[in-house]
Image (cartoon, rainbow, N blue to C red):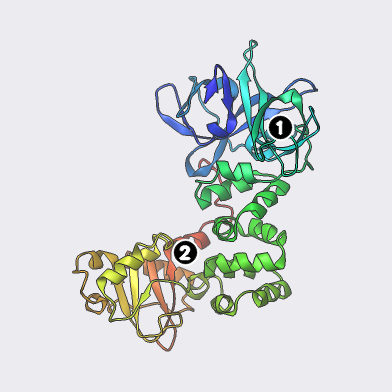
Amino acid sequence: MATGTRIYVARLAGVSVFDPNGDPVGRVSDVVVTFRPLPLPPRVIGLVVEIQNRRRIFVPIGRMTSAEADAVVLTTGSVNLRRFEQRPGEALVLGNLLDRTVTVLDGGARATVVDAAMEHTRTRDWVLTRVAVREQHGSRLTRRRGHVRQLDWSEVDGLGPAPDADQGADALLAVLSTSRAADLASRLQDLDAKRRHEVAAALDDERLADVLGELPEDVQVKILAQLTDERAADVLEEMDTDDAADLLAELPAAERERLMQLMEPGEAAPVRRLLRYSEDTAGGLMTTEPIILSPDATIAEALARVRNPDVSSALATQVYVCRPPSQTPTGRYLGVAHVQRLLREPPSALVSGVVDDDLKPVRPETELSELTRYLATYDLVAAAVVDESDRLVGAVTVDDVLDHLLPEDWRERDLDG
Protein backbone atom coordinates (compact mmCIF):
# COMPACT_ATOMS: atom_id res chain seq x y z
CA MET A 1 0.00 0.00 0.00
CA ALA A 2 2.77 2.42 0.83
CA THR A 3 6.38 3.11 0.00
CA GLY A 4 7.87 4.36 3.24
CA THR A 5 5.10 6.57 4.57
CA ARG A 6 3.29 7.01 1.23
CA ILE A 7 -0.29 5.72 1.18
CA TYR A 8 -2.58 5.75 -1.86
CA VAL A 9 -6.05 6.71 -0.71
CA ALA A 10 -8.06 4.57 -3.14
CA ARG A 11 -6.30 1.50 -1.78
CA LEU A 12 -7.11 2.61 1.76
CA ALA A 13 -10.86 2.66 1.06
CA GLY A 14 -12.68 -0.19 2.77
CA VAL A 15 -9.73 -1.19 4.96
CA SER A 16 -10.73 -2.30 8.46
CA VAL A 17 -9.99 0.06 11.37
CA PHE A 18 -9.00 -1.36 14.78
CA ASP A 19 -8.39 0.10 18.20
CA PRO A 20 -5.12 -0.71 20.05
CA ASN A 21 -6.71 -3.82 21.59
CA GLY A 22 -7.46 -5.28 18.17
CA ASP A 23 -11.20 -4.66 18.42
CA PRO A 24 -12.84 -3.54 15.16
CA VAL A 25 -14.03 0.06 14.93
CA GLY A 26 -15.24 0.20 11.31
CA ARG A 27 -13.89 0.67 7.80
CA VAL A 28 -12.17 3.57 6.07
CA SER A 29 -14.63 5.42 3.87
CA ASP A 30 -12.62 8.47 2.78
CA VAL A 31 -9.82 10.87 3.70
CA VAL A 32 -10.45 14.52 4.61
CA VAL A 33 -8.07 17.27 3.50
CA THR A 34 -7.88 21.05 3.69
CA PHE A 35 -6.30 23.21 0.99
CA ARG A 36 -3.41 25.56 1.66
CA PRO A 37 -1.97 28.42 -0.43
CA LEU A 38 0.01 27.17 -3.42
CA PRO A 39 2.54 25.67 -3.77
CA LEU A 40 1.83 23.92 -0.47
CA PRO A 41 0.00 20.60 -0.95
CA PRO A 42 -3.29 19.92 0.88
CA ARG A 43 -3.01 18.89 4.50
CA VAL A 44 -4.67 15.64 5.58
CA ILE A 45 -6.72 16.21 8.72
CA GLY A 46 -8.49 12.91 9.24
CA LEU A 47 -10.27 9.77 8.12
CA VAL A 48 -13.96 9.22 7.54
CA VAL A 49 -14.68 5.84 9.14
CA GLU A 50 -17.90 3.93 8.56
CA ILE A 51 -19.10 2.22 11.71
CA GLN A 52 -22.21 0.14 12.39
CA ASN A 53 -25.51 1.09 10.76
CA ARG A 54 -23.50 2.65 7.91
CA ARG A 55 -22.90 5.79 9.97
CA ARG A 56 -19.75 7.76 9.19
CA ILE A 57 -17.63 9.45 11.82
CA PHE A 58 -14.52 11.61 11.73
CA VAL A 59 -11.24 10.30 13.15
CA PRO A 60 -8.36 12.84 13.35
CA ILE A 61 -5.37 11.68 11.36
CA GLY A 62 -3.20 11.98 14.48
CA ARG A 63 -5.08 9.01 15.92
CA MET A 64 -3.75 6.71 13.19
CA THR A 65 -0.64 4.84 14.29
CA SER A 66 -0.29 2.53 11.29
CA ALA A 67 -1.91 1.83 7.95
CA GLU A 68 -1.35 -1.38 6.05
CA ALA A 69 -3.07 -3.18 3.19
CA ASP A 70 -5.51 -4.91 5.52
CA ALA A 71 -5.72 -2.75 8.66
CA VAL A 72 -5.59 0.74 10.08
CA VAL A 73 -4.76 0.90 13.80
CA LEU A 74 -5.72 3.80 16.06
CA THR A 75 -4.10 5.07 19.23
CA THR A 76 -5.77 4.81 22.62
CA GLY A 77 -8.54 7.17 23.56
CA SER A 78 -12.26 7.55 22.90
CA VAL A 79 -13.70 8.02 19.44
CA ASN A 80 -16.25 10.77 18.82
CA LEU A 81 -19.31 9.00 17.43
CA ARG A 82 -20.92 12.17 16.10
CA ARG A 83 -21.92 11.80 12.46
CA PHE A 84 -19.35 13.25 10.06
CA GLU A 85 -20.33 16.46 8.31
CA GLN A 86 -18.06 18.03 5.74
CA ARG A 87 -17.15 21.62 6.63
CA PRO A 88 -16.39 24.55 4.33
CA GLY A 89 -12.81 24.41 3.13
CA GLU A 90 -12.63 20.62 3.49
CA ALA A 91 -12.51 18.12 0.65
CA LEU A 92 -12.94 14.37 0.48
CA VAL A 93 -10.21 12.74 -1.57
CA LEU A 94 -12.44 10.02 -3.00
CA GLY A 95 -15.64 12.03 -3.03
CA ASN A 96 -14.34 15.35 -4.35
CA LEU A 97 -10.93 14.85 -5.96
CA LEU A 98 -11.14 11.52 -7.77
CA ASP A 99 -12.25 11.92 -11.40
CA ARG A 100 -11.35 15.61 -11.35
CA THR A 101 -10.12 16.83 -14.73
CA VAL A 102 -6.71 18.48 -14.40
CA THR A 103 -4.06 19.99 -16.62
CA VAL A 104 -0.53 18.57 -16.59
CA LEU A 105 1.69 21.65 -16.46
CA ASP A 106 4.46 20.01 -18.51
CA GLY A 107 2.85 20.03 -21.94
CA GLY A 108 -0.67 21.17 -21.04
CA ALA A 109 -2.30 17.76 -21.51
CA ARG A 110 -5.71 17.10 -19.96
CA ALA A 111 -5.96 14.14 -17.58
CA THR A 112 -8.27 12.57 -15.02
CA VAL A 113 -7.30 11.93 -11.40
CA VAL A 114 -7.60 8.24 -10.48
CA ASP A 115 -5.82 8.28 -7.10
CA ALA A 116 -3.87 10.48 -4.70
CA ALA A 117 -1.13 9.64 -2.24
CA MET A 118 -0.59 11.04 1.23
CA GLU A 119 2.75 11.07 3.01
CA HIS A 120 3.99 11.62 6.55
CA THR A 121 6.28 14.66 6.73
CA ARG A 122 9.15 15.35 9.08
CA THR A 123 6.85 17.64 11.07
CA ARG A 124 4.56 14.61 11.57
CA ASP A 125 1.83 16.10 9.40
CA TRP A 126 0.17 14.13 6.64
CA VAL A 127 -0.11 15.86 3.25
CA LEU A 128 -1.22 14.91 -0.26
CA THR A 129 1.98 14.84 -2.27
CA ARG A 130 1.31 12.75 -5.36
CA VAL A 131 -1.54 12.21 -7.80
CA ALA A 132 -2.09 9.37 -10.24
CA VAL A 133 -3.66 10.61 -13.47
CA ARG A 134 -4.91 8.96 -16.65
CA GLU A 135 -4.71 10.86 -19.91
CA GLN A 136 -8.03 11.74 -21.48
CA HIS A 137 -8.99 10.60 -24.95
CA GLY A 138 -7.17 12.63 -27.56
CA SER A 139 -4.52 14.04 -25.22
CA ARG A 140 -0.80 13.69 -25.83
CA LEU A 141 0.28 13.04 -22.29
CA THR A 142 1.80 9.74 -23.42
CA ARG A 143 1.75 7.64 -26.52
CA ARG A 144 -0.26 4.98 -24.72
CA ARG A 145 -3.95 5.81 -24.52
CA GLY A 146 -5.20 5.66 -20.95
CA HIS A 147 -1.74 5.27 -19.46
CA VAL A 148 -1.57 6.19 -15.76
CA ARG A 149 1.22 8.46 -14.54
CA GLN A 150 2.21 9.47 -11.04
CA LEU A 151 2.95 13.15 -10.71
CA ASP A 152 3.90 15.51 -7.94
CA TRP A 153 1.02 17.63 -6.64
CA SER A 154 2.74 20.75 -7.99
CA GLU A 155 2.90 19.28 -11.51
CA VAL A 156 -0.86 19.51 -12.13
CA ASP A 157 -3.35 22.36 -12.18
CA GLY A 158 -7.04 22.07 -11.30
CA LEU A 159 -7.03 20.36 -7.90
CA GLY A 160 -7.84 23.39 -5.80
CA PRO A 161 -11.11 24.03 -3.94
CA ALA A 162 -13.21 24.50 -7.08
CA PRO A 163 -16.86 23.45 -6.52
CA ASP A 164 -17.66 23.77 -10.24
CA ALA A 165 -14.66 21.74 -11.42
CA ASP A 166 -15.12 19.35 -14.32
CA GLN A 167 -15.50 15.91 -12.73
CA GLY A 168 -16.63 12.48 -13.85
CA ALA A 169 -17.22 9.40 -11.70
CA ASP A 170 -15.35 6.43 -13.20
CA ALA A 171 -12.55 6.29 -10.64
CA LEU A 172 -14.86 6.69 -7.66
CA LEU A 173 -17.19 3.99 -8.98
CA ALA A 174 -14.20 1.68 -9.48
CA VAL A 175 -13.40 2.10 -5.78
CA LEU A 176 -17.04 1.43 -4.86
CA SER A 177 -17.63 -1.33 -7.42
CA THR A 178 -18.05 -4.06 -4.79
CA SER A 179 -20.24 -1.98 -2.47
CA ARG A 180 -23.79 -3.11 -1.83
CA ALA A 181 -26.58 -0.87 -3.08
CA ALA A 182 -27.39 0.26 0.47
CA ASP A 183 -23.73 1.19 1.11
CA LEU A 184 -23.46 3.10 -2.16
CA ALA A 185 -26.71 4.90 -1.33
CA SER A 186 -25.22 5.92 2.00
CA ARG A 187 -22.12 7.25 0.24
CA LEU A 188 -24.26 9.26 -2.16
CA GLN A 189 -25.98 10.99 0.73
CA ASP A 190 -22.59 12.15 2.03
CA LEU A 191 -21.76 13.89 -1.26
CA ASP A 192 -22.82 17.39 -2.22
CA ALA A 193 -25.70 17.64 -4.71
CA LYS A 194 -23.46 18.25 -7.74
CA ARG A 195 -21.18 15.30 -7.03
CA ARG A 196 -24.13 13.06 -6.17
CA HIS A 197 -25.73 13.71 -9.54
CA GLU A 198 -22.43 13.10 -11.34
CA VAL A 199 -22.12 9.68 -9.70
CA ALA A 200 -25.78 8.82 -10.29
CA ALA A 201 -25.46 9.74 -13.96
CA ALA A 202 -22.47 7.39 -14.32
CA LEU A 203 -24.28 4.34 -12.87
CA ASP A 204 -25.98 1.96 -15.25
CA ASP A 205 -29.77 1.77 -15.11
CA GLU A 206 -29.97 -1.42 -13.03
CA ARG A 207 -27.40 -0.28 -10.47
CA LEU A 208 -29.01 3.14 -10.16
CA ALA A 209 -32.42 1.52 -9.69
CA ASP A 210 -31.07 -0.60 -6.82
CA VAL A 211 -29.44 2.43 -5.21
CA LEU A 212 -32.55 4.60 -5.53
CA GLY A 213 -34.53 1.97 -3.66
CA GLU A 214 -32.22 2.50 -0.65
CA LEU A 215 -32.44 6.30 -0.58
CA PRO A 216 -34.93 8.59 1.17
CA GLU A 217 -37.73 9.61 -1.16
CA ASP A 218 -36.73 13.29 -1.26
CA VAL A 219 -33.24 12.33 -2.47
CA GLN A 220 -34.76 9.91 -5.00
CA VAL A 221 -36.88 12.71 -6.43
CA LYS A 222 -33.87 15.05 -6.72
CA ILE A 223 -31.79 12.46 -8.55
CA LEU A 224 -34.64 11.50 -10.88
CA ALA A 225 -35.17 15.17 -11.72
CA GLN A 226 -31.59 15.38 -13.04
CA LEU A 227 -32.13 12.57 -15.55
CA THR A 228 -33.68 12.91 -18.97
CA ASP A 229 -37.28 11.70 -19.09
CA GLU A 230 -36.25 8.75 -21.26
CA ARG A 231 -33.55 7.61 -18.83
CA ALA A 232 -35.78 8.22 -15.82
CA ALA A 233 -38.37 5.90 -17.38
CA ASP A 234 -35.70 3.25 -18.04
CA VAL A 235 -34.53 3.41 -14.41
CA LEU A 236 -38.10 3.18 -13.12
CA GLU A 237 -38.55 0.01 -15.21
CA GLU A 238 -35.53 -1.52 -13.48
CA MET A 239 -36.79 -0.70 -9.97
CA ASP A 240 -38.94 -3.05 -7.92
CA THR A 241 -42.53 -2.20 -8.72
CA ASP A 242 -43.34 -1.12 -5.17
CA ASP A 243 -40.28 1.14 -5.00
CA ALA A 244 -41.11 2.65 -8.40
CA ALA A 245 -44.69 3.29 -7.31
CA ASP A 246 -43.52 4.94 -4.07
CA LEU A 247 -41.18 7.21 -6.01
CA LEU A 248 -43.75 8.15 -8.65
CA ALA A 249 -46.28 8.92 -5.94
CA GLU A 250 -43.96 11.73 -4.77
CA LEU A 251 -44.10 13.47 -8.17
CA PRO A 252 -46.71 15.92 -9.47
CA ALA A 253 -49.50 14.13 -11.33
CA ALA A 254 -48.53 15.47 -14.76
CA GLU A 255 -44.89 14.46 -14.38
CA ARG A 256 -45.87 11.04 -13.02
CA GLU A 257 -48.12 10.37 -15.99
CA ARG A 258 -45.50 11.58 -18.48
CA LEU A 259 -42.91 9.14 -17.13
CA MET A 260 -45.34 6.21 -17.05
CA GLN A 261 -46.25 6.90 -20.66
CA LEU A 262 -42.56 6.52 -21.54
CA MET A 263 -42.27 3.19 -19.69
CA GLU A 264 -42.95 -0.08 -21.46
CA PRO A 265 -46.67 -0.90 -21.06
CA GLY A 266 -45.89 -4.22 -19.39
CA GLU A 267 -43.66 -2.47 -16.83
CA ALA A 268 -46.02 0.44 -16.22
CA ALA A 269 -49.16 -1.65 -15.70
CA PRO A 270 -48.26 -3.12 -12.27
CA VAL A 271 -47.01 0.28 -11.11
CA ARG A 272 -50.35 1.83 -12.06
CA ARG A 273 -52.16 -0.83 -10.06
CA LEU A 274 -50.08 -0.11 -6.98
CA LEU A 275 -50.71 3.63 -7.27
CA ARG A 276 -54.43 3.00 -6.86
CA TYR A 277 -53.92 1.94 -3.25
CA SER A 278 -53.23 4.08 -0.22
CA GLU A 279 -49.58 3.89 0.86
CA ASP A 280 -50.53 2.70 4.35
CA THR A 281 -52.38 -0.41 3.15
CA ALA A 282 -51.22 -3.85 2.05
CA GLY A 283 -51.91 -2.86 -1.56
CA GLY A 284 -49.75 0.22 -1.28
CA LEU A 285 -46.91 -1.67 0.39
CA MET A 286 -46.87 -4.86 -1.67
CA THR A 287 -44.64 -5.94 -4.52
CA THR A 288 -46.33 -7.38 -7.58
CA GLU A 289 -43.43 -9.75 -8.32
CA PRO A 290 -43.34 -12.50 -5.66
CA ILE A 291 -42.35 -16.09 -6.51
CA ILE A 292 -45.43 -17.65 -8.16
CA LEU A 293 -45.74 -21.26 -9.33
CA SER A 294 -48.53 -23.41 -10.71
CA PRO A 295 -49.62 -26.46 -8.65
CA ASP A 296 -47.93 -28.89 -11.06
CA ALA A 297 -44.48 -27.33 -10.54
CA THR A 298 -41.92 -29.47 -8.75
CA ILE A 299 -40.09 -28.84 -5.48
CA ALA A 300 -36.89 -28.58 -7.52
CA GLU A 301 -38.38 -25.75 -9.60
CA ALA A 302 -39.51 -23.94 -6.45
CA LEU A 303 -36.07 -24.18 -4.84
CA ALA A 304 -34.41 -22.95 -8.01
CA ARG A 305 -36.63 -19.86 -7.94
CA VAL A 306 -35.89 -19.30 -4.25
CA ARG A 307 -32.13 -19.44 -4.91
CA ASN A 308 -32.31 -16.55 -7.40
CA PRO A 309 -29.96 -13.88 -5.94
CA ASP A 310 -32.20 -11.13 -7.31
CA VAL A 311 -35.03 -12.22 -4.98
CA SER A 312 -34.98 -10.52 -1.59
CA SER A 313 -34.50 -12.72 1.45
CA ALA A 314 -37.99 -11.87 2.72
CA LEU A 315 -39.68 -12.88 -0.54
CA ALA A 316 -37.56 -16.04 -0.74
CA THR A 317 -39.11 -17.47 2.43
CA GLN A 318 -42.21 -18.68 0.61
CA VAL A 319 -43.62 -19.56 -2.79
CA TYR A 320 -47.17 -18.66 -3.79
CA VAL A 321 -49.10 -21.38 -5.59
CA CYS A 322 -51.80 -20.22 -8.01
CA ARG A 323 -53.78 -21.35 -11.04
CA PRO A 324 -52.53 -19.87 -14.34
CA PRO A 325 -51.76 -17.20 -15.30
CA SER A 326 -48.67 -16.93 -13.12
CA GLN A 327 -48.29 -13.16 -13.41
CA THR A 328 -50.18 -10.87 -11.05
CA PRO A 329 -53.13 -10.71 -10.99
CA THR A 330 -52.96 -14.50 -11.19
CA GLY A 331 -55.56 -17.21 -11.48
CA ARG A 332 -57.14 -18.51 -8.29
CA TYR A 333 -54.82 -18.39 -5.29
CA LEU A 334 -54.32 -21.87 -3.75
CA GLY A 335 -51.96 -21.19 -0.88
CA VAL A 336 -48.33 -20.75 0.14
CA ALA A 337 -45.43 -23.21 0.26
CA HIS A 338 -42.89 -22.32 2.96
CA VAL A 339 -39.22 -22.76 2.08
CA GLN A 340 -38.54 -24.82 5.22
CA ARG A 341 -41.10 -27.37 4.05
CA LEU A 342 -39.72 -27.36 0.51
CA LEU A 343 -36.28 -28.28 1.84
CA ARG A 344 -37.67 -31.39 3.54
CA GLU A 345 -39.39 -32.83 0.46
CA PRO A 346 -38.04 -34.86 -2.51
CA PRO A 347 -37.09 -32.60 -5.45
CA SER A 348 -39.44 -34.49 -7.77
CA ALA A 349 -42.52 -33.96 -5.57
CA LEU A 350 -45.11 -31.34 -6.57
CA VAL A 351 -45.54 -28.07 -4.71
CA SER A 352 -49.29 -28.73 -4.58
CA GLY A 353 -48.54 -31.42 -2.00
CA VAL A 354 -46.96 -28.98 0.47
CA VAL A 355 -49.31 -26.01 0.12
CA ASP A 356 -50.43 -24.35 3.34
CA ASP A 357 -54.01 -23.30 2.60
CA ASP A 358 -54.96 -22.65 6.24
CA LEU A 359 -53.14 -19.31 6.33
CA LYS A 360 -55.66 -16.69 5.28
CA PRO A 361 -54.20 -14.06 2.89
CA VAL A 362 -54.73 -10.33 3.38
CA ARG A 363 -56.72 -7.98 1.18
CA PRO A 364 -55.21 -4.95 -0.60
CA GLU A 365 -57.20 -2.59 1.60
CA THR A 366 -55.82 -4.11 4.84
CA GLU A 367 -54.48 -1.22 6.90
CA LEU A 368 -50.92 -1.04 8.17
CA SER A 369 -51.81 -1.59 11.83
CA GLU A 370 -53.79 -4.73 11.04
CA LEU A 371 -51.08 -5.96 8.67
CA THR A 372 -48.44 -5.54 11.40
CA ARG A 373 -50.49 -7.62 13.83
CA TYR A 374 -51.01 -10.28 11.16
CA LEU A 375 -47.28 -10.70 10.49
CA ALA A 376 -46.49 -10.77 14.21
CA THR A 377 -49.28 -13.24 15.05
CA TYR A 378 -48.16 -15.82 12.49
CA ASP A 379 -44.39 -15.11 12.73
CA LEU A 380 -44.20 -14.24 9.04
CA VAL A 381 -41.78 -12.08 7.06
CA ALA A 382 -44.10 -11.95 4.02
CA ALA A 383 -47.80 -12.28 3.32
CA ALA A 384 -49.92 -12.97 0.25
CA VAL A 385 -52.25 -10.20 -0.93
CA VAL A 386 -55.39 -11.45 -2.67
CA ASP A 387 -58.24 -9.49 -4.29
CA GLU A 388 -61.99 -10.11 -4.01
CA SER A 389 -61.80 -12.66 -6.87
CA ASP A 390 -59.20 -14.76 -4.99
CA ARG A 391 -56.45 -13.72 -7.39
CA LEU A 392 -52.95 -13.09 -6.03
CA VAL A 393 -52.11 -9.46 -6.71
CA GLY A 394 -48.86 -9.28 -4.76
CA ALA A 395 -47.02 -9.94 -1.52
CA VAL A 396 -46.06 -7.59 1.28
CA THR A 397 -42.81 -8.10 3.20
CA VAL A 398 -41.83 -7.13 6.71
CA ASP A 399 -39.06 -4.78 5.50
CA ASP A 400 -41.62 -2.70 3.61
CA VAL A 401 -43.80 -2.61 6.72
CA LEU A 402 -40.84 -1.45 8.83
CA ASP A 403 -40.03 1.29 6.33
CA HIS A 404 -43.46 2.77 6.94
CA LEU A 405 -43.49 2.22 10.71
CA LEU A 406 -40.11 3.88 11.33
CA PRO A 407 -39.68 7.68 11.24
CA GLU A 408 -39.06 9.12 7.78
CA ASP A 409 -35.50 10.09 8.70
CA TRP A 410 -34.53 6.74 10.23
CA ARG A 411 -31.72 6.23 7.72
CA GLU A 412 -30.04 9.45 8.84
CA ARG A 413 -30.50 9.05 12.57
CA ASP A 414 -27.53 8.30 14.83
CA LEU A 415 -27.71 5.15 16.94
CA ASP A 416 -27.30 7.21 20.08
CA GLY A 417 -29.88 9.79 18.92
Element under disc 2: helix
Q: Is residue 412 visible?
A: no
Provide residue 141's location: percent of width, then percent of height. 73, 34
Give the residue displayed 51% in from the left and 46% down from the top: 179
- Residue type at mark 2 is Val
Nearer-the-camera pick, 273 or 345: 345
Whether residue 320 is visible to the viewer of this picture, yes or no, is yes
Left or right, 271 with respect to 45, comes to left
Q: How far across and how far down the image is residue 80, in percent?
A: 55, 30
Foreground residue among 387 and 205: 205
User: What type is the residue that disc 1 sits on?
Assistant: Glu
Please provide percent x and percent y for residue 7.
57, 24
SS under mark 1: strand
With 160 as the anchor, is 405 left or right in this view? left
Seen in the picture, residue 76 relative to 381 is either above or below; the reply is above
- Residue picked out by circle 1: 90
The quarter of the picture where residue 347 lies is bottom left
Say if 155 sits above or below 330 in the image. Answer: above
Task: Tell which residue pokes out farthest to the bottom in this image.
Answer: 389
Q: Nearer the viewer, residue 47 or 351?
A: 351
Q: Quadrant of the C terminus?
A: top right
Any mark on residue 401, and which? 2
Q: Is residue 43 above or below residue 93?
A: above
Would you say the residues marked 2 and 1 are in contact, meaning their CB atoms lie under 8 Å apart? no
* Residue 24, position as x, y percentages in the image: 43, 31
In this view, the residue in front, 57 or 119, is 119
Residue 82 picture quarter: top right
**Is tag 2's residue or tag 1's residue first in the polypeptide sequence?**
1
Q: Residue at x 38, y 63 (%)?
A: 308
Mark 2, mark 1: which one is toward the viewer? 1
